[in-house]
């Protein structure tokens, strides 16, 4: 990332033990607008392992008091935080568009998701239910309760820079844990906005710590003996390293990684609705979602009709600076991400897929200073092609043919990932069969593969995740452990199973 010596640019700090402090490295990195790289948003701390260790120590000290704060009192702070985000939704959304590029309408949705998650999890402060069950012995009481784990390491990506941190940090806090948070270096401002709201709402010093910059920080968070939980969202390759780093210390690890999601369009589908869903699923957030619909499999009876309309509508999408009215597709988040998109377009051509529309970088006029790419559709794609197997994370969609639902499901399941899938059909039997047979963590009927709601579990199968889920009450299982408690008030020794008559 380019650096700058412009001292007039705003400099942002780390949050450690309730104080905003500089990194021990003395170095800063620049955060620039991907729609216009002349726009320097700010300079942020290039942190070191020593900075991470100080943050972990602060979180460990704070945990000794925070875990004793009653969960309803912790929840009250989170309710205040949600209210503050509501008040600042527009300014946070504009900051987010400026630093990561997606259109303003979508960044408003990102901030709204943080609001929804914070309100939802705050409600769990009075609802972290355990179980009370009848004992098999007389004069004995049996129950279970949730208990916090300690210090949580939180590592988040750039594509949902406020929503995803809220999915992790808020349930961690309501369960009684403390946090060390490393956001993506591409979107540090949105992370700081979120953490400042928590601080202003009344989170005590050291309960939430933020350390920006540097892969070494992530390594410390996944290896340090004090860290009890590591929650990571990002690529499968990096997630594998996080898992390997955490394994020797037997840490609880939550991984949310890649996706190669599919929309199935059957011959009885409402085609106009399916086209709209594929446009939103494939090109919303410029395809930079783990749930993006980068694959579409269409029944051969409607393949040509669908592809023609899909291409026509994609070609008409307005690409530009996400802060401008009428823009529907923003830039790639960085030059390197744009280079990845362009590489896969060339791979698709070499593999023999038909480039139906798009396929080029946009770099003239208003696009000259940003990382823009045309919405791109490949037709005649074979399921084994790399563009149909590997995550691109850009505005590129592969369209394939099928002759039956069984073939469509086989294509859908024939990738390394298992996050999200969708089917467009008017036949309820077809919908339920696909719902059953697609091995994914999320499934949609007559809707695209994106658009999760905070009160249901979010996550995937296979190389997408490791079995844990975010959102809903499932998130509490990541950030708490069960304790079973037995109270014997008989006044004598009772031996379970042995003394049962």
Image (tube, rainbow, N blue to C red):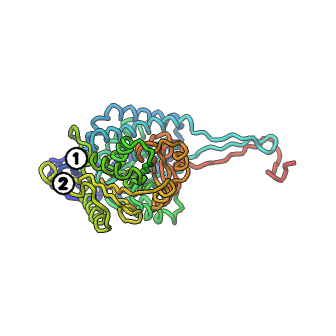
Q: Is residue 342 visible?
A: yes
Q: Kindly identify which residue carries mark 1.
A: 319
Camera-nearest residue between 497 and 116 = 116
Q: Position of residue 396 (x, y in %)?
A: 31, 55
Give the side of residue 348 with respect to residue 425, left or right: left
Q: Is residue 18 visible?
A: no
Residue 318 location in percent, x, y?
22, 44
- Report the residue marked by disc 2: 362
Task: Give the label on residue 91, or none.
Answer: none
Towards the viewer: 195 or 108: 108
Closer to the chain start, of discs 2 and 1, is: 1
Farthest residue, direction left: 365
At x 53%, y 48%, the residue is 435
Quarter holding the N terminus?
A: bottom left
- Asked which quadrant contains residue 53, the reply is bottom left
Seen from the viewer's position, the closer of residues 486 and 296 is 296
Q: Residue at x 82, y 41 (%)?
A: 138
SS at mark 2? Answer: strand
Mark 2 and mark 1 residues within 8 Å of each other at the beta carbon: yes
Disc 1 is placed on an element classified as loop
Instruction: Give the quarter of the image for residue 219.
Output: bottom left
Residue at the spot 78% in from the left edge and 41% down from the top edge: 489
Q: Callout 2 environment at 10 Å: few (<14), some (14 to 19), or many (20+)?
A: some
Q: Position of residue 293 (x, y in %)?
A: 38, 51
């Amino acid at each position: 990332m380019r650096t700058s010596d412009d001292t007039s640019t705003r400099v942002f700090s780390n949050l450690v033990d309730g104080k905003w402090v500089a990194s021990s490295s003395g170095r800063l990195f620049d955060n620039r607008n991907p729609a216009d790289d002349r726009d320097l948003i700010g300079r942020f701390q290039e942190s070191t392992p020593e900075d991470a260790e100080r943050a972990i120590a602060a979180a460990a000290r704070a945990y000794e008091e925070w875990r004793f704060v009653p969960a309803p009192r912790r929840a009250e702070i989170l309710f205040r935080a949600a209210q503050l985000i509501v008040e600042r939704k527009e300014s946070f959304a504009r900051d987010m568009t400026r630093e990561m590029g997606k259109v303003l309408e979508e960044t408003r949705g990102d901030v709204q998701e943080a609001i929804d998650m914070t309100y939802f999890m705050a409600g769990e402060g009075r609802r972290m239910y355990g179980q009370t069950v009848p004992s098999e012995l007389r004069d004995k009481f049996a129950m279970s309760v949730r208990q916090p784990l300690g210090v949580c390491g939180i590592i988040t990506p750039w594509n949902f820079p406020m929503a995803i941190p809220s999915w992790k940090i808020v349930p961690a806090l309501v369960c009684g844990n403390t946090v060390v948070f490393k956001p993506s270096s591409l979107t540090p401002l949105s992370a700081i906005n979120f953490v400042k709201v928590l601080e202003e709402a009344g989170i005590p010093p050291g309960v939430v710590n933020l350390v920006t910059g540097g892969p070494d920080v992530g390594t410390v968070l996944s290896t340090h003996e004090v860290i009890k939980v590591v929650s990571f969202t990002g690529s499968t390759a990096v997630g594998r390293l996080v898992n390997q780093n955490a394994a020797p210390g037997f840490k609880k690890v939550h991984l949310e990684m890649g996706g190669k999601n599919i929309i199935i369009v059957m011959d009885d589908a409402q085609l106009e609705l399916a086209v709209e869903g594929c446009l939103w699923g494939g090109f919303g957030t410029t395809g930079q979602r783990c749930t993006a619909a980068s694959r579409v499999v269409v029944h051969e009876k409607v393949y040509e009709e669908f592809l023609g309309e899909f291409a026509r509508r994609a070609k008409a999408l307005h690409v530009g600076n996400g802060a401008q009215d009428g823009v529907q597709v923003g830039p790639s988040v960085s030059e390197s991400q744009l280079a990845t998109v362009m590489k896969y377009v060339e791979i698709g051509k070499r593999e023999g897929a038909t480039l139906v529309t798009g396929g080029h970088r946009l770099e003239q006029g208003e696009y000259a200073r940003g990382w823009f790419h045309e919405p791109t559709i490949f037709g005649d794609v074979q399921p084994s092609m790399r563009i149909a197997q590997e995550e691109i994370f850009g505005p590129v969609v592969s369209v394939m043919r099928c002759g039956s639902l069984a073939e469509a499901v086989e294509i859908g399941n024939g990738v390394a990932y298992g996050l999200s899938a969708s089917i467009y059909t008017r036949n309820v039997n077809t919908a339920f069969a696909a719902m059953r047979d697609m091995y994914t963590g999320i499934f949609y009927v007559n809707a695209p593969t994106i658009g999760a709601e905070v009160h249901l579990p979010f996550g995937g199968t296979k190389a997408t995740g490791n079995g844990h889920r975010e959102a809903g009450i499932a998130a509490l299982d990541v950030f708490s452990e069960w304790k079973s408690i037995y109270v014997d008030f008989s006044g004598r020794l009772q031996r379970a199973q042995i003394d049962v008559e």
